[in-house]
Amino acid sequence: LFYAARKTQIHFIDGGRNTSQRTAIIEWIDTAFKLGYEDAKAYYVRAEAHFHDDNLGLAFKDINMAVEMAKNDKPMLFGCLNLMFFALVVISKSVNFLVILFTT
């Protein structure tokens, strides 16, 4: 299940509009976790799917799990921190928008 999810290009699916395939990826990885599979890459892939579905809280939860598991895997750690950075940028833009909206 995880192998199938990992081979799917999450952010290129239908220009980012196809949430059903990202939902399937999340479900596949959830099932793999229920069967006892744990891997930093699995958490990263699920975090990426959550990120592209605008579920930033779930994305951060999975990124943190991936970072904990990938402390000795520098390329994986870099990918996790990169995704975390982009999620923080999205949050920052939302916060700035809300500040502008409610102060004008």
Image: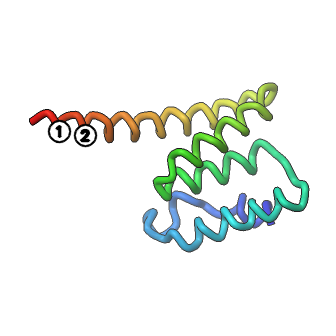
Q: What is the three-letter code of the residue carrying label 1?
A: Phe
| Residue 62 % position (x, y) | 66, 44
- In the image, residue 66 sits, relative to residue 72, either above or below, namely below
Instruction: Calculate the distance from the C-alpha at mark 1 to the C-alpha at mark 2.
Output: 6 Å
Which quadrant holds residue 88? top left
Q: Is residue 96 left or right of residue 74?
A: left
Identify the secondary structure beneath mark 2.
helix
| Residue 103 % position (x, y) | 14, 33
- In the image, residue 71 sits, relative to residue 21, either above or below, namely above
Identify the secondary structure beneath mark 1.
helix
Q: What is the three-letter code of the residue carrying label 2?
A: Leu
Front-most of residues 71 and 102: 102
Q: Is residue 21 left or right of residue 71?
A: left
Q: Is residue 26 left or right of residue 91?
A: right
- In the image, residue 49 sits, relative to residue 94, either above or below, namely below
What residue did someone put label 2 on?
98
Marks 1 and 2 close (CB-CB < 8 Å): yes
- Residue 83: assigned label: none
Residue pictured at 73% horizontal, 27% vertical: 74
What residue did someone put label 1 on?
102
Residue pictured at 60% horizontal, 60% vertical: 9
| Residue 85 % position (x, y) | 50, 32
Residue pictured at 64% horizontal, 30% vertical: 78
Front-most of residues 47 and 6: 47
Which quadrant holds residue 4? bottom right
- Rendered-image quadrant of the C terminus: top left
Q: Answer few, some or many: residues within 10 Å of disc 2's Cα (few below 14, many 20 plus, some between 14 and 19).
A: few
Residue sitting at the far front? 102
